[in-house]
Amino acid sequence: MGETRNAYRILVGNPEGKRPLGRLRRRWVDNIRMDLREIGWDGMDWKDLAQDREQWRALVNTKFLRTKHETTDKYNLCGVYQMTCKDCDLKYVGQTGRNFRKRYKEHIREIKTNGQKSKFAQHILDTTHNYHTIDKAMEILHIEKKGKMLNTLESFHIYELTKQNLQMNEALTDSYNPIYDILIKINQAQEI
Ligand SMILES: [Zn+2]
């Protein structure tokens, strides 16, 4: 954890950095360079990517704050969530600035009323699959206030699902994002 904490400080504190290069900082930079090389973006300076603070912060949040939220009132909070179908592996990623429970009920209402406002509901209706109760269907990915950060986190998770061919959301318009690709690789490396 010590090393990741340092990576966190480097990314959030001062991504372009005027401080002297310490050992941990250099190691982190080298990792980013390696990741860029692997995805064929070795021509791009990682510092160019780091200038997009919003996406770096999303990266850091996803890497460090994607924890299991097991508090009893978690569904009263807001943020980014994922809904999984009961009968297949497809998932829907969404965000809410109100609370998760309300959002879940809205998806279910769309199913019951044959509505057009929910991609999750559309999947259930189109396939005649079933849906789980909230505790099994809805996974909280990030607890976060409404704002730009919520959009970035949501778009990252949709991107990730798209790469896995597991998404119910609309196809993405921005089809390639090198920062997200690096992030996915980092997350995969952590899971091993
Ligand atoms: Zn399904």
Image: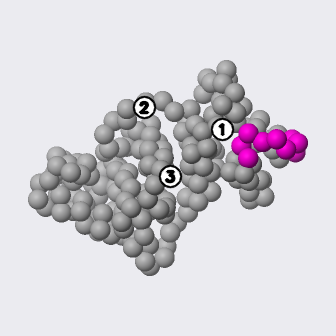
For the question of whether residue 130 can be seen, the reply is: yes
Q: Could you give the CA–CA distance between mark 2 and mark 3, rounded to whole angstroms? A: 17 Å
Q: Earlier in the sequence, mark 2 or mark 3?
A: 3
Rendered location of residue 49, percent (x, y): 63, 34
Please tell me how many numbered marks the rendered image carries. 3
Which stretch did the figure color magenta? 14-22
Q: Is residue 124 left or right of residue 66?
A: left
Give the class, few, some or many, for how many residues have Cα within 10 Å of label 1's Cα (few <14, many ≥20).
Answer: some
Residue receiving disc 3: 149
| Residue that label 2 marks | 174
Q: Secondary structure at mark 1?
A: helix
**What distance separates the C-alpha of mark 3 from that of mark 1?**
16 Å
- Seen at 67% across and 20% down, the residue is 43
Amino acid type assigned to the residue bearing label 2 in the image: Asp
Q: Is residue 61 left or right of residue 15?
A: left
In the picture of the structure, the residue carrying the numbered disc 1 is 50
Q: Residue at x 30, y 63 (%)?
A: 103
Q: Amino acid at mark 1?
A: Ala
Q: Is residue 186 above or below residue 149?
A: above
Q: Is mark 3 within 8 Å of ligand 1?
A: no
Q: Secondary structure at mark 2?
A: loop
On the image, the x and y values in percent for residue 87 come to 27, 54
Front residue (pair 83, 89): 83
